[in-house]
Image: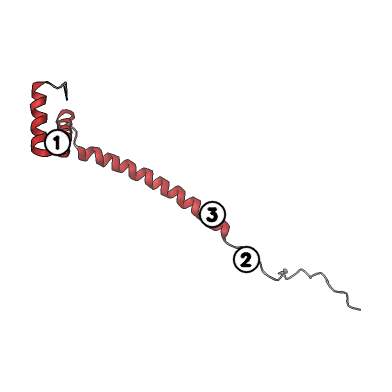
Amino acid sequence: MKGAGGGLLGYYFANSLYFYFGVKGAYLVLISLSLISALFITEVSYFYIFSNWGNKIKIVLNNIYNVLNNIGAKFFKSLRRKEVPDYQEYEKDEIPKKIFKIK
């Protein structure tokens, strides 16, 4: 017995959905009816749920962005060459050491 379970009403309902909408359309109608019934049972709007999820996802993504930005800044800072002068600077009061001996 194909599709056993669901009762007589379920049989007629499923066959009529299959006849009018096909397999994909029947699944689409059933999913839509399930979402609408969940909306009426819980009395919580989907907009409220998704806006809360959106705010939480925004906070998480912002934290990830800040962490990656800090890591990138440290990485690129370490890649920069430090400028080392080719000459040695002396203070005004300091006398440079003699390098060559003059006879």
Which of the two labelled residues, at mark 3 and mark 2, occupies the earlier sequence position? 3
Q: On residue 36, which mark appears?
A: none
Question: Alpha-carbon neighbours of circle 3 within 10 Å: few (<14), some, or many (≥20)?
Answer: few
- Measuring from the top left, give residue 12's x and y in whole percent: 7, 27
Q: Based on the displayed image, in which of its 4 quarters is residue 52 positioned? A: top left
Q: Based on the displayed image, in which of its 4 quarters is residue 93 positioned? A: bottom right
- Measuring from the top left, give residue 22's x and y in whole percent: 13, 38
**Residue farthest toward the right in the current orientation of the protein:** 103
State the CA–CA distance, disc 3 to disc 2: 18 Å
| 10 vs 50: above or below | above
Q: Residue at x 21, y 40 (%)?
A: 47
**Residue farthest toward the front in the current orientation of the protein:** 1
Q: On residue 75, which mark appears?
A: 3
Q: Quadrant of the N terminus?
A: top left
Q: On residue 83, which mark appears?
A: 2
Q: Nearer the viewer, residue 69 or 94?
A: 69
| 83 vs 11: above or below | below
Q: Quadrant of the C terminus?
A: bottom right
Is 90 on the left or on the right of 43, as rendered? right
State the CA–CA distance, disc 1 to disc 2: 71 Å
| 8 vs 83: above or below | above
Tell whether label 3 touches label 1 (CB within 8 Å): no
What type is the residue that disc 2 sits on?
Glu
